[in-house]
Amino acid sequence: MLGYLVDLAVQMERDADRPEAEVHRRDRLLLARQPGGEGGGAGKADLSTDGELRRGRLEACPTRVVPRDRRATLQGWIEALRAAGEALPGVGVSAAYRLLVAALMGTGLVVGWSVAAVVFRYDGSRPVNVVEVLAVFVVAQLALLMLLGIVLTPSRWLRLLPGALTVQEALAWFSPGQALRLLQRRLPPGVRELVARTGRPLASGLPGLGTVRKWAGTFAAQGFAVAFNVGALAGCLYLVTFSDLAFAWSTTLEPSVERVHRWTGWAATLWGWWLPEAVPSPELIRETLFYRRDAVPLAIAAGRWGGWWPFLVACMITYGALPRVVLLAVAGWRFRVAMRRALLEAPGVALVLDRLESVWVATQATGTETEPEPVREGGPAEQGEDMRVAPRRLTLVNWGGLALEEARVRERIAADWRCEVLGTETAGGSASIEADAAVVTALAQTPEDSGVALLVKGWEPPLLELLDFLRDLRRAAGNRRILVVVPLGLAGEEGGSWQPLPAAELERWRRRLRSLGDPGLVVRSWPERPAALAAPGGGA
Amino acid sequence: MSDRPLFAVVGHPNKGKSSIVATLAADDSVRIGPEAGTTTQARRYPMRVDGQELYALVDTPGFQRARRVLHWLRQHERGAHRRAEVVRQFVASHRDTGEFPDECELLEPILEGAGILYVVDGSVPYGPEYEPEMEILRWTGQPSLALVNPIGPADHLGEWQAALGQFFQVVRVFNAVTAEFRKRIELLRAFGELQEEWRGVLEQAVRLLEADRARTRRLASHTVAETLAAMLAHRVERKLPARANPAGHRAALEAEFRSDLRRLEQRCRDRVETLYSHRRIERQEAGLPLVDEDLFAERTWLVFGLGRRQILAGGALGGAATGAWVDAHLGGASLFAGAVLGAGIGAVVGWWTADQLVRVRVMDVPLGGRLITAGPTRNRNFPHVVFNRARYHHWLVARRTHAAQGVLAVREDPRQVLPPLPGEELSALEKTFGRLRRHPEATAVQEELADHLTAVFARDDEAGGGEGGEHRGNAGPSTD
């Protein structure tokens, strides 16, 4: 479960900056290709191609399917990601954690045994001090347990106990996380950045991981503590079994025997009723009090030397090992609960599930659009408002069915361009190909020093059809003839008069006709005059 | 004929075919430009559901030599019942000659069984040069629909509708730049009228697109809710020497704070736009107003990040331990008075020591100093401002078509175009803002806010409408 959780955190962090559509597509394909998934088939998913899923059943396809076991869906998704080659650290982190717990337990055993060997050390010169044993294996452990209790208690409960919250805050400073942060500050900048980047998903990707981290740490620590106690007990029992130990008690505080007996009685409440030999008697207490200045072995009767060990072992088990075992079990249970919760309830997981459960819909193109061929820059064919060689005589061609009043157009052209209009032809539009050819032939027969002016709809794009006509005309009429193309702008709102084409659109016409490479081809704007040249209604 | 509906978008060059495809396919990668012949090859825009194609649109080049093609077809006519065959023959014999590349490219999908979507511009006059194109399309025998897309003022709709009605089964007006999601769905349904077999698939497509739209709104809501939470919790801090004057650093700190908030907001904008498949939006938005007189705080900080409270707690713990030792010495007779007294004395010493430690230097490194912070903002109006801006931006993005190329101008006051929230909803939102301010990291509160936003966004999206003036550039008035 820990591995899934870590991978979930890491993957969510990675996906945060990826386009949602891309991630959605990937995940749906991954899920479908899982064994038992709708796409069927196992193995490594190919993320580069679209699968043909649920072919033939799409009309019945629901927009969203919520599975019964959403946790299993998430786990399946993570497994699919791993199978698809995503480098996810979850399995490694999980294994490392198990290794850490095992190492801590091994260390705990060794440390427990070693501490027992030191505390229960007896070389015959001085007996093992019972107070020392209790201080190390009971009091110190209970104190640590209390501090752990404060750390683990939710802060809202600690508010009820004055000062407890402050203690919790102070203890937080000694947490492993804080120690790691301090350690991180001491690292070289490059390494520090690397560590921060690696740890970021685990630290901030899933805020719900905070609880998981807390119980993971507690579980590992309790593993150490249980092993420590087991090691200590084993060491103690080993020494009791295979060597002779003399126990006595000694303290400067000088409590009375009755008080010590009362204390030991309290301590033995839990086992005294069924294990009376593990409860020190007043006589034992009285007879085993010793002072270092005395010759101890002489002061204590030989039969009393081992009288304390059942009580000490019972104390170590009851107040040392058992609470730790219980805490280990609780931490393990809370750890699992926290992981299961975090897997489904951590922020952002709802959106991941939403993605996994909703069909992926895309309407965009699958490939990139091909670049259009650049317009071939041919000959000049580009003139401004002046014609380089102004023809004295012109034949007009109405291209594309412009609705013109012929007489007025001729009059206007003649006046504005100071030339004689020889006649008007009609081509393009609804005219047939044969009619166009006939117009070309007719134009070719006009005097060689006359030009041809094509009046065209400037709001329509220059089609290849027009370019073909110009090419045919050039071929038939010879290279010396001036050909003028005049794109007209639409009539204004009031109607009735053609407008000069806006400069940008005129420029587009020029660019397009330049591709013909015809030096005798001129694009000219319609003169801006108020004269009404269009047919009534102003339409085309 | 294909079992999957296929629609070829055809017509004269520069009449908005690509714009229509961009809008219907929600794809802003479509090349749209004023130059004729921007589209040189047919390009498919399939609607895919979990990888399976449901239907596809095909953007095609415009007719360039329609009269010549029609001339050829007429020359080879073998009766009305074999006209489609003649068109096929035309494509086969000219595919590799390079003489009619655009016509071959646009006719091929139609010959594969595509329905015809013939696009014209309703803002320019009808002309006879369109008739050969329509005649060729009629020769293919495929179901057809004409779309009048007014690129400019729709002054010529009537004449177009009259002319198109003679050639096409269905004629619809569809402004590719201003059409909202609802119009897009309506048009998709209209495609189903072309062929009985396509209706079911297209209804399913509509259902899926609507569900996907709702999901996109949910994601956008979450994005905004997360951002709002981050902005409400945001603060910046600066460590200063113990004797430094914090006033001199306030301006820089405030600028950094504002810049961070702006960055968070901009990231949110980018994400919302990406969710709606807009990747190329140029955005104009006024800076985030921030009026907060109580933005700054100042406190002593100590080395290793220990603050005054931690020092105090440490002192109390030490004092309590010492007192407890005395209690133990007295055999418990003192009833833990030693521990309590010790904790008190320790706490006082800790409090006093914190101030002294700030001035201590170890190996010329100061142990502590001052920490000034800016934020988080306490302005009650702030979340409302952020919410209104995000709501307005979402509304603009959700209704913006992928053919729109102008700047997205996010106005400062969205109340001019969006209706105010009902009092009850506003009150619930205010409460959620309050909770969010207290617990910005709480997932449940963020989810709660996201739910509010989803409802608001859905209402805005479904209401559509509003004015169309935000899209500067080529946005024309809606005529659909």
Image (cartoon, coloured by chain):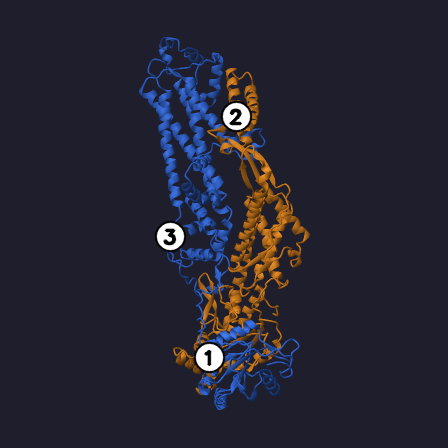
Q: How far is the residue under mark 1 from the one under mark 3? A: 62 Å
What amino acid is at disc 1?
A: Pro
Q: How far is the residue under mark 2 from the one under mark 1? A: 98 Å
Tell me if residue B77 can be seen.
Answer: no
Residue at mark 3: A85
Give residue A174's mark. Answer: none
What chain does mark 1 sit on?
A
Q: Among all residues in the image, which is located at the extreme left?
A: A242
Chain A shade in the render: blue
Task: Give the orange chain's letter.
Answer: B
Q: Nearer the viewer, residue B294 or A408?
A: A408
What chain does mark 3 sit on?
A
Which is nearer the N-term, disc 1 or disc 3? 3
Residue at mark 2: B317
Q: Please identify, in this view, whether the residue under mark 2 or under mark 1 is nearer the observer.
A: 1
Count of marks placed on residues = 3
Q: Secondary structure at mark 3?
A: loop
> Do tag 2 and tag 3 residues touch (Cβ < 8 Å)?
no
